[in-house]
Amino acid sequence: MKYIDEFRDGELARNLARHIAAAADPARPYRFMEFCGGHTHAIARYGLKALLPPNVRLIHGPGCPVCVLPIGRVDQAIRMALEYEVTLCTYGDCLRVPASNGLSLLKARARGADVRMVYSTQDALALAQRHPERQVVFFAIGFETTTPPTAVAIAQAQALGLGNFSVLCCHVLTPAAIIGILGAAQIQKTQKTPAAAQTPEIASAQAGAKADPQGGLALDGMVGPAHVSTVIGSAPYEFVPERYGKPVVIAGFEPLDMLQAILMLVRQVNDGRAEVENEFTRAVTRQGNPKAQALVARIFTLRPEFEWRGLGTLPASALMLSPAYAGFDAELRFPLPYTPVPDHKACECGAILRGVKEPRDCKVFGSVCTPDNPLGSCMVSSEGACAAHYTYGRYQDLGGMSHPEAHRP
């Protein structure tokens, strides 16, 4: 298939792996975090770690939108559906995220809650139009990729005068999460990013950042997200090399994309450079999508702070509806106070999302916690590190066996 098969060519993949092995200095480690959950899935599916030299390590990051959703936000959605009897719409993966008291949205539906799976915000909007007698709430999650469609739905609802449509907004921001990962304590030790290079999100997050109680993670560079970058562009990552001295290479999702990005990171480290480079030039520009950005800026504003699973409460790291669209804010229409809830004591999702542990480090991985019976959110979405490792990587742990569905280059 055009634009797909050529990025999965086995011989080219092996050739890139040889270049990485030749470029990597055996006397030093290379620790690169793939921020995006789609990258985590691709790495596991295509067995890319097996192609890399042992001193080039890939570390999972917090880029799975379902995984970073804290239990308290799921509880809030469940209570909204049960106590206010709204029709709650959301994406499929959200339905199975474990919440308090053994519940999930799917289990709440079994108890009588009107919970619907939708494929897009337009499905929820159409449902509100068909049933004006019902209050329809869209449970909006995700990074900058899924935020513009939510903004479109809110703008359309206002234009249509839909008084029975609202949004429970849990959209989060990539730059703030990167700041949390790299360690807020470093902010005070480095030169401030020039104002011209800052987005409002980055400036606010840096100004309000506190020392990371979880401790920082030693990284040599980052593989920048693909879909997010098509919206925000590559410019918002420029604070990473300027402030933290770490290179970033934005990569597509295919195996050759990932291997090329890793090679580019190795070369930057070897050269002592720290820059933002773009491997995914066929889809990502420096400016991103200005129309999408303008729409999001009109509909949303920054939350002062937001709790993330694994990363704790990060300042200026999420969005809420701006005052002009507050009438469509489900948190105002159906007031339910947010209550933080700790993760299950046996679950290591938080540490895995911070990159300090891997799925196989979790004692309940693959036994008590499976995709059919997830104990934590990292086992729910296909982009979650635990789900990806369960589907593909665990077979490599058992002596290099290949999973029958793994399509290795």
Image (cartoon, grey):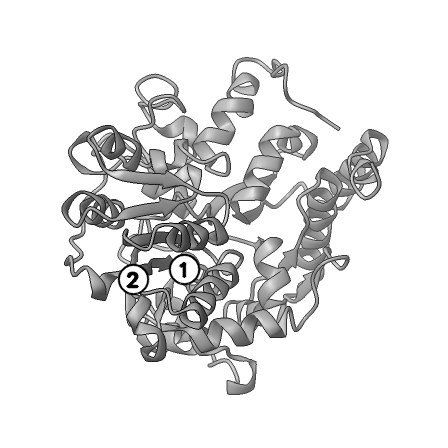
Q: What residue type is labelled 2?
A: Phe
Judging depth in this view, the residue of 158 and 366 nearest the camera is 158
Q: Which amino acid does label 1 sit on?
A: Val
- 5 left or right, relative to 351: right
- Residue 385 visible to the viewer: yes
Q: Residue at x 38, y 69 (%)?
A: 161
Judging depth in this view, the residue of 210 and 10 nearest the camera is 10
- 296 left or right, relative to 135: right
User: Quick one: quadrant of the C terminus?
Assistant: top right
Specify the quadrant of the image occupied by residue 404: top right
Q: Is residue 291 above or below residue 29?
A: below
Q: Residue 319: horizontal and vertical position, in percent? A: 37, 67
Q: Residue at x 17, y 50 (%)?
A: 84
Q: Residue 276: horizontal and vertical position, in percent? A: 65, 65
Q: Which mark is residue 172?
A: 1
State the residue position of label 2.
306
Distance in Å between CA atoms under marks 2 and 1: 8 Å
Q: Which residue is drawn at 61% across and 73% down?
A: 291
Kindly check if marks 2 and 1 are in contact, taking CB atoms under 8 A apart as contact: yes
Residue extending farthest to the bottom is: 195
Q: Assign a secondary structure to mark 2.
A: strand
